[in-house]
Amino acid sequence: MQLAGLDAASLQTVRVSVVDQLYATLRGAIIDNDLSPGARISEAEIAQHYGVSRQPVREAFIKLANEGLLEIRPQRGTFVAKISLSAVMDARFVREAVEADIVKLLATDPAPALIADLNDQLARQRGIIGGSARDFMEADEAFHHTLAAGAGKENAWRVIVEMKAQMDRVRFLSSVHFSVARLVDQHTTLVEAIAAGDGARAEQSIRAHLKGILHDLPVIEQEHPEYFR
C-alpha cells in the first residue's frame, strides 16, 4: 500500500479503511464457518497473510470480540467464539418483533416502486435456487434490508445487523438443510400481503418466516455440539 504524500488525516482514513476491510473479511469467514468455532487465530499470521501491520489486525480483533465473534484470552491467544445459544434466541426474538412492525407499516401504504423492487429481487432469488448458500444469504440480507429501508427504518436495521451475527452463523450451518425454494415462496407470500395492504397477513408471514431457525437450531446443535456454548 503506497502511503507517500498522504497527510495525517488521509493516513488515518487509510488505517480505518484497512481495519474495516479486515473486520468485514474475518467476520464473513466466521459466519460462513471458514473459521470454525473454537479455532485459534493469530494476530501475526493474519497480518502477514494480508500484508498489513499488526495494529489494524488488533483493532479488527477487538471489534469482532465486542460483537461476540472472537474471544481474546490474555496470555493464551485469540479464538473464534463458540456460538451463543442465548444470543441466537435473543437476536431472533428482537428481529421478529422489529420486522413484524416494519411489514405492517409497509402494508399501510404499499409504495409501487418498493413492490416492484421486491418483485425484482424475488426473480433474482428464484434464479439462485440450486446455487450456493452464500449467494442466497446475500440475496436474503438485501431483501430484508430493503423492507426496513422502505419503511424508513434504517437505524432499526442496523440494530438488527449488530445483534444477529450469532443467528447468521446458525443460518449458514443450517443451509444444507433448508429449502431455498421454500424460503423464496415465503418471501413471495410476504410481498403479496404487503402489496395487497394486508398488514395482518404480512405480519403473520414474517413471523412464520423468522421462526424457521427454531426448527433448524436443535438439528445443528446435535450435529455440531462442539460449536455451541
Image: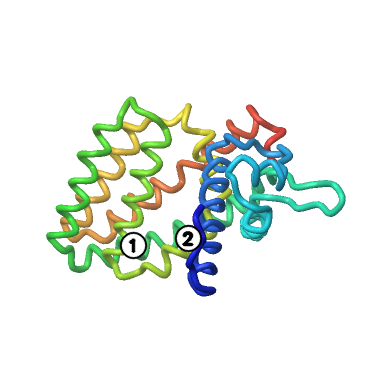
Q: Quadrant of residue 101?
A: bottom left
Query: Which residue is pictured at 50% across the width and 40% down the height?
Result: 171
Identity of the residue furthest to the left in this view: 112
Residue 47 left/right relative to 190? right
**Which residue type does callout 1 highlight?**
Ala
Question: What percent of the width, then of the height, locates residue 43?
Answer: 71, 47
Which disc is residue 160 wearing? 2
Q: Categorize mark 1 by other alpha carbons within 10 Å: few (<14), some (14-19), many (20+).
A: many
Residue assigned mark 1: 148
Circle nearer the N terminus (2, 1): 1
Query: Which residue is pictured at 18% across the width and 47% down the height?
Result: 119
Residue 229 seen from this side: no
- Nearest to the observer: residue 104 or residue 114: 114
- Nearest to the observer: residue 17 or residue 185: 17
Which disc is residue 80 wearing? none
Q: How is the image coloured?
A: rainbow
Q: Categorize mark 2 by other alpha carbons within 10 Å: few (<14), some (14-19), many (20+).
A: some
Query: Which residue is pictured at 18% across the width and 61% down the height?
Result: 197
Identity of the residue furthest to the front in this view: 5
**Which residue type does callout 2 highlight?**
Ile
Question: What percent of the width, then of the height, locates residue 147?
Answer: 30, 58
Residue 82 left/right relative to 181? right
How far is disc 2 from disc 1 in space, using C-alphas? 10 Å
| Cβ atoms at labels 2 and 1 below 8 Å apart | yes
The vertical placement of 155 against 194, above or below, is below
- Nearest to the observer: residue 100 or residue 173: 173
The vertical placement of 225 against 54, above or below, is above
Element assignment for label 1: helix
Query: Which residue is pictured at 51% across the width and 52% down the height?
Result: 1
Question: What percent of the width, then of the height, locates residue 189?
Answer: 25, 45
- Quarter of the image that includes the C terminus: top right
Residue 44 left/right relative to 150? right
